[in-house]
Amino acid sequence: MLTFQGWLIAIAIIVVSMVLAITHIHSFLAVNSPVTADILIVEGWVTDNAIKAALDEFQGNSYGHLVTTGIPVERGYYLAEYQNFAQIAASTLQKMGLESEKITVIPSPDVKKDRTYASAVAFRQWLEKTDLKPKPQGINILSESTHARRSWLIYKKVLADKMKVGIISIPSQTYNPQRWWMYSAGVRAVIDETVAYIYASIVSWRA
């Protein structure tokens, strides 16, 4: 049995651990670790603010290609001009001033789960078929907020160390990432992506 002082120490350790988890989990998930890269991959589902950041990132660095990825839209498919998020992101970038010849659209199939994995596989298949010379030595993935850590993990596993893989996370505009626990959107983002990251960590993504 613990003594009274032992219980106080145990409770203090638990409280400190919880505080550290709360204050650091968001920055862990919303990771930024870019590499020197030839290709910038933009996840097509991100907001217009993130797409504008992608344009700035592409124009401010020495990328040769910008790739947009994404699954088919889930609503309005028969009414929309563009049927997948990869096309929507590419068209948005063109409207913002990026030349169409610098953009490669790589839509992924309509899947109900593991959508980031489907996008990563579609990119790998395109990379294996393309005649890019020289072959790219590195890629950066541009994602949004807490989704970044999971995207980074999955792309690295799917590409199987064939090249350097970096990640760029654009902050969400729906909450303050420094005080995410004060916003319902922040709580949902952290909880959902923590569970999803744990799942992604234990699944074998190489195929």
Image (cartoon, rainbow, N blue to C red):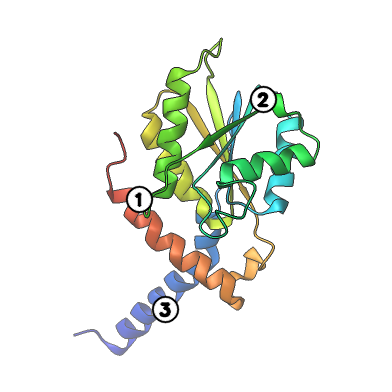
Q: Which residue is mark 3?
A: 12
Farthest-out residue, right: 97
Mark 3, Cα crowd under 10 Å, few <14 / some 14-19 / many 20+, is few
Instruction: Identify the residue position indicated by label 2 in the image.
Output: 63
Location of residue 81 in the rendering, given as x and y in whole percent from the top left corner: 65, 47
Residue 2 vs residue 173, the one in the foreground: 173
Tally of numbered tags: 3
Image quadrant occupied by the C terminus: top left
Residue at the spot 63% in from the left edge and 25% down from the top edge: 65
Nearer to us in this view, 186 or 55: 55
Residue type pointed to by label 1 = Ala
What amino acid is at disc 3? Ala
In the rendered structure, which disc, 1 or 3, sits on the residue that comes first in sequence?
3
The 10 Å Cα crowd at callout 2, few under 14, some 14 to 19, many 20 or more, is some
Q: Which residue is at the front of the view, 42 or 80?
A: 80
Lower sequence index among marks 1 and 2: 2
> In the image, is 64 to the left or to the right of 70?
right
- The quadrant the N terminus occupies is bottom left
Q: Above or below — where is 141 with respect to 180? A: above
Side of 80 relative to 198 (left or right): right
Looking at the picture, how far across and down is residue 164, in whole percent? 49, 27
Residue farthest toward the front in the current orientation of the protein: 78
- Real-space CA distance between mark 1 and mark 3, rounded to the nearest whole angstrom: 32 Å
- Which residue is identified by label 1? 200
Q: Position of residue 90 (x, y in %)?
A: 66, 39
